[in-house]
Amino acid sequence: MKLRSCFCFGIPLFLSFFLLISTSTSRGLAANDTSFIRKTCKKCAQSDPNLSYNFCLTSLQAAPNSHRANDLRQLGKISIKLLGRNLTNSSSYIKELLKNKDKTDPFVRSCLHDCLDLYSDATLTAKQAIRDYRAKRYDDSNIDVSSIMDSSTTCEDGFKEKEGVVSPLTKRNNDTFQLSAISLSIINMIRLNDD
Ligand SMILES: *[C@@H]1O[C@H](CO)[C@@H](O)[C@H](O)[C@H]1NC(C)=O
Ligand SMILES: *[C@@H]1O[C@H](CO)[C@@H](O)[C@H](O)[C@H]1NC(C)=O
Ligand SMILES: *[C@@H]1O[C@H](CO)[C@@H](O)[C@H](O)[C@H]1NC(C)=O
Ligand SMILES: *[C@@H]1O[C@H](CO)[C@@H](O)[C@H](O)[C@H]1NC(C)=O
Ligand SMILES: CC(=O)N[C@H]1CO[C@H](CO)[C@@H](O)[C@@H]1O
């Protein structure tokens, strides 16, 4: 009698556990569970009107290991690394543009030189931002990323000082601005949670 009642209760309990486990693993294995990224990007876009939700989503989804990130801290690290790689690449892009000695207008060249300085510094600052982030120095990491963001607007503004000049770096600067905004927004969320 005792055995039977245990059995009766046991089966549904066992079954529901099994269902719970199997649904959660199948979700985990469906490598593209992007719900956490979506949720985070929604919060980021709400906290910063300059930040595009779609940009956030496509950038973070394309970042290595991002679909495996299941907490804000991991995703924050991924976003700063993404920013760092983007900066490195933009530096080499600007160097390529500067090799084009004859075709480039002297004013544009001088702007490109300024931008190269800004981007080279920003690449180092991104490394510092990662170190600060890892050590949970979120205020410092915030300052690092903010200065990277400022570099992108300073670079872009340089080209505006002469009429009729078109910046060849508008997309890159905007990418830097947006990627910085994503990192800042995540850093600030963590900072608030930690208090
Ligand atoms: C949005 O971008 C503009 C132009 O760069 C800037 O002046 C403004 O402070 C930004 N707003 C926020 C909330 O970051
Ligand atoms: C920089 O990031 C943007 C947004 O994720 C991406 O579209 C672009 O391809 C990246 N550029 C490089 C050179 O990685
Ligand atoms: C970086 O940008 C260059 C163009 O300047 C491109 O050829 C290269 O594939 C990019 N590398 C990465 C890792 O995005
Ligand atoms: C910067 O990129 C975002 C996202 O792709 C876009 O919504 C915005 O219009 C761009 N801004 C500029 C000035 O190009
Ligand atoms: C099946 C599928 O869509 N896989 C994608 C999951 O997300 C990663 C990272 O964005 C992609 O590289 C895969 O192609």
Image (tube, helix red, strand yellow):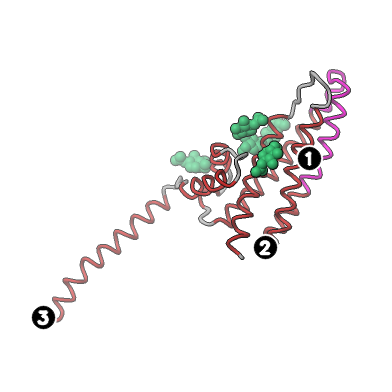
Q: Which residue is mark 3?
A: 1
Local packing at callout 1 (Cα closer than 10 Å; few below 14, some 14-19, many 20+) is many
- The mark that comes first in sequence, 2 or 3, is 3
Residue 176 in sight in this render: no
Circle 2/circle 1 CB separation < 8 Å: no
Residue 103 percent across, percent down from the top left: 84, 18
Q: Which is nearer the N-term, disc 1 or disc 3?
A: 3
Q: Residue at x 62, y 39 (%)?
A: 50
Q: Amino acid at mark 1?
A: Tyr
Give the dominant element type of the magenta stretch: helix, strand or loop. Answer: helix
Left or right of 182? Residue 68 is left
Among the two numbered marks 2 and 1 on one chain, the one whose residue lies closer to the N terminus: 1
Task: Tell me the SS state at disc 1.
Answer: helix
Q: Nearer the viewer, mark 2 or mark 3?
A: 2
Total tally of numbered discs in the picture:
3
**Most distant residue in the bottom direction:** 2
Q: Give the residue at mark 1.
A: 119
Marks 2 and 3 in Cβ contact (< 8 Å): no
- Which residue range is magenta in the image? 97-124
**Rendered residue at 69%/63% (across/down):** 135
Residue occupied by mark 2: 136
Would residue 155 be seen by someone viewing this image from the given angle? yes
Hey, what amino acid is under mark 2?
Lys
Q: Nearer the viewer, residue 148 or 15?
A: 148
Classify residue 138 by image quadrant.
bottom right
* Cα separation between marks 1 and 3: 77 Å
Q: Dividing the image into four equal quarters, which quarter contains ligand 4?
A: top right
Q: Quadrant of residue 107?
A: top right
What secondary structure is found at the residue carrying circle 2? loop
The quarter holding residue 4 reads bottom left
